[in-house]
Each structure stands twice: as C-alpha cells, then as structure tokens.
Image (cartoon, rainbow, N blue to C red):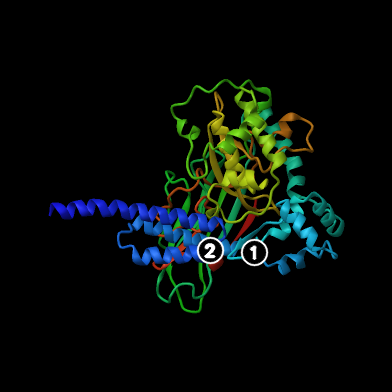
Amino acid sequence: MKLLRLLFLFFVPMACIAANTTYQTVLTEMKNGNFKFAEEMIDFEVKTNLQLTATDKQALLDQKEIMRRIRLDFSRTEADVMSYVKRYYPKVTPAMFINWETANTLEYKIIDGEKRYFNQAAPNLFRLDTAAKRQKEIVDGIVPDKKAILLQKHIPDIIKTTSHNNVCMGNPQKMTVTYTLTVKPDQVPDGKTIRCWLPYPRTDVARQKNVKLFSVSQNNYQIAPNSCAHKTIYMEQKATKGKPAKFQIVFSYECYPEFHNLEHQTIAPLTDTLLISDFLKERKPHIVFSDAIKQLSAQIVGTETNPYQKAKKIFTWIRANYPWASAREYSTIPNIPEYVIANRRGDCGQVSLLLITLCRYNGIPARWQSGFMMHPGSKNLHDWAEIYLQNIGWVAVDVSFGVQTWAKDPSERYFYLGGQDAYRWIINTDFGQPLSPAKQFMRSETVDFQRGEVEWEGGNLYFNQWNYTFNIAYK
C-alpha cells in the first residue's frame, strides 16, 4: 500500500507537468499559425491522458474553441479583399498589398500555411492608412458625422447647465429600448432548453436612473443583482425544430450627463487608498505591468507627478496614436493592451484597457465601464473607463471620444476626461466577471458583456449562431 501511494504521488505530478507542457506547446503552435497540428495535439491529449484534470482538459478545449473563433474572424481571401479595395483603387497592385501588410494596416494571419485576412481588414485599411483614407473620401465624399454634430451642441449645454446650477449632473435623456436576441433555427435540438442572458440597465450608477421594465418575452426571468459586475436579465425557452428562438425585453431609463471641470481644479495626491486599492493592481491576463507598458509609460508620462496631468497625457497620447479600427473578438486576444501597442490601433474597449493599465501603473485608480452608446444615428456597443481622483471620486474617461478638436475652451476640448454625455446605456462596472446565474460553458465574449450570451446543455452558442437588434425611442 505504501508503494502504491508513492507511485501515485510520483505519477500525478508527472501527469500535471505533461499537461502543462502540452498546453504551452499548443500555445506556441497557435502563435505560429499551426492550428491543425495544435488541434491534433489537443485531441490526442484529451483522449489518451487519463490523469488529465477537468480544469486542464477544459483549458485545452478552450484553446481549440479559440482557434475556431480566429478562423471565423480571419475568413477573407485575397480575392475578397481585392474586390473591396478595387472600389477605391481600380488599378491596385500586389506591391501595394505588400506595402499595406508590411505597415500592418492590412491585417492577416497565416493559418495552416494559408494567408487569411481579417473580416474587417479591407474597411480598416481605409481607416488606418492616411493615403487610403483620403482616396476613400475622394470616391465616396466626406460623410457628415451625425454624432459629432450632436456633441458640438450637447457638450456646451452640459457644461453650461452644470456650471449654472453648481452641480455635476445635467439634464437627463429618457430612452425606451426594445432589445431582441434571436437564435437561428436548428442551432439546438428540438425540445432542449436554451439559456439566454440579455443586457439590462444598471440601477446602481448615479448617471442612470428610473429603470422601468415593460415586457419580457418569457414569463420566468431573473434580473442580476447589483453585486454582479455584468447586469443581465436571464430567461429560458425550449427549442422548436425549424424555428428561431426569440428573446426580447422592452424597458426605459433616464441617462444623466456628468461634468467635472478638472481643467480648473487642483487635484491632490491620492490618499484614499483603502477602498480603491484593487483598482491599482495588475489583473491577468489584460492588466499587466509588462516591459511594454513600462516603456510606453515612461515615454508618455515622463516625470509628471500630478494625477490629473498624468491621466491627461495618457488620454491624449492614446487618442493621437491609436486610431479606431474594427476589432477581432476579444476572447481570441491573450493580452489586449499589448495587442494595441503592437498593432498601433484599437477599438473602444481595447484602448480603454490600455488606458486603465497605464493609469494603474502610474498610481491612478482606474476601472472598466461599458454598455452601449445611444446617440441618434450612431448607436453601437461601447466601452470606456473611470478613474478615481482625490476629493472628487470616480469620473468617466472615454478615450475613444477623445479630444474635441472643434472646441476652443479646454473644458470642452477635454470634456471626455472626467465627463460623460447623456446618450449611454451602462451595463458593466467591470470586465470578465461571472454572469448570474452562472454560465456553464466558455462565453462568446470573455471580457465584455453587451450583445448577450446563449448556451444549452450541449455547449455555448457563438455569435454566428444568433443575431441581436435594438431600437431606441427618445423622449
């Protein structure tokens, strides 16, 4: 019996070491684009390693799922991209493609020896390459930005109202939302239960009040408590063969704009560290004080010591150097801030995570906030951040909206460094946290929560298996 125990103690650690070695090898092969080989390794390990723990097994299967998602994100051929580019460059040449790829403005991956372009590589080219952007404007004309036109009136109104009334909150915007998630037919076997989480307005954020739920497509539903970072409404229904499964809610709420005139305030050094210490820490995998972060911080912040001026430098630098571009799914990116630095671009959530990481590294408490931007004609998923300033508290920072170049007054120019407009739907106060009730399988979106999540007993339903829509009525 003693010998058996010794053998057990020897072989279990050896099995763990082998599993870890396989996992690291899989990651290396994935990084090198050898997806088929990595998948074969995973299948072999799962089938033959009887000592593989449930956690290690799931970690390997998750990597297999991530490869499937990357393939979906990188599904365009050179012919697909060429067809789009020829709208603006009828005489486009292979040399032009090589130049764009070398400059990393035309995104692709080599997967199992084949060049596969990101689904949004062609549209992103005309956002990232200055000459291509100008060429597109020549062909299509300059399309007026409805949101920018709205904000040029909205922002001064917020500043005027809050200054006149000596408050930080302005006049609210009331919105009624119809949100629908539809699972495509036959994604789930007939009679099996579909579990669905839809986004819902938070009721614990000062900028969002008077939430009223008018209707829910399923009678039995659960609204997540405010203790959950992701505010959801959960429901179930049985799948019916040949028919879609629809989940729908209708609700209203009021969104209040907020403004803090930080340009004209003296921000004291941070002393309130007890309650906000967690927001100064690293948090793997996306908030890591890596060498790349430290080097970028030194370049941006330098010797600055004032908390607001540090934040302002970070805010301004990110906005100036990382243009917006459509992003691949977050679940496929090992470290999002490092991805932004390496690729010199980012969407709203990506640059927000970079800002949060840089702020924390520089002693400024920072956290995630997200949901939707609800501006008429510009509604979309959206992420931003909040930072904590001594004697003021938490204030919104939206680096994607950036510096308002049309404004002459510094308070208007830097409105989104401490201010927020009235066209938001706030759902999340953190990223990558558990859903309520708990989800059994890997989420479609492992970082953010906006579009929704769906699963059944056989696994997760990914974004290509369902659609979502939302309509807004303004009052």
User: In which quadrant is the N terminus drawn?
Assistant: bottom left
- Looking at numbered disc 2 in the image, what kind of residue is underneath it? Phe
Q: SS at mark 2? A: helix
In the rendered image, the vertical position of residue 184 relative to residue 377, given as above or below? below
**Amino acid residing under circle 1:** Arg
- Residue 176 in percent (x, y) is at 59, 54
Q: State the image quarter where residue 354 is shown.
A: top right
Q: Quickly name the residue at label 2.
A: 35
SS type, badge 1: strand
Classify residue 334 as left or right of residue 84: left
Q: Nearer the viewer, residue 60 or 380?
A: 60
Label 1: few (<14), some (14–19) or many (≥20) C-alpha neighbours in 10 Å: some
Outermost residue toward the right in this view: 138
User: Residue at point 72% right, 37% down?
Assistant: 403
Residue 251 point in image, percent of width and height: 54, 54
Residue 117 drawn above or below residue 260: below
Residue under the image location 54 percent in, 62 percent down:
34
Q: In this view, does 107 lie to the left or right of 111?
A: right
Q: For this rendering, which residue is in front, 113 or 96?
A: 113
Residue 130: x, y in percent? 80, 49
Tag of residue 116: 1
Which image quadrant is residue 85 in? Answer: bottom right
Is residue 344 left or right of 362 when viewed as pictured? right
Q: Where is residue 49 in the image (x, y as percent from the top left)?
A: 33, 62
Residue at figure coordinates x 45%, y 76% from the top left: 240
Q: Is residue 394 at all visible to an observer of this figure?
A: no
Compared to 330, does 169 lie above or below?
A: above
Of pointers 1 and 2, the one earlier in the residue sequence: 2
Q: Cα distance, mark 1 to mark 2?
A: 13 Å
Q: Residue furthest bottom?
A: 242
Quarter of the image for residue 161 reads top right
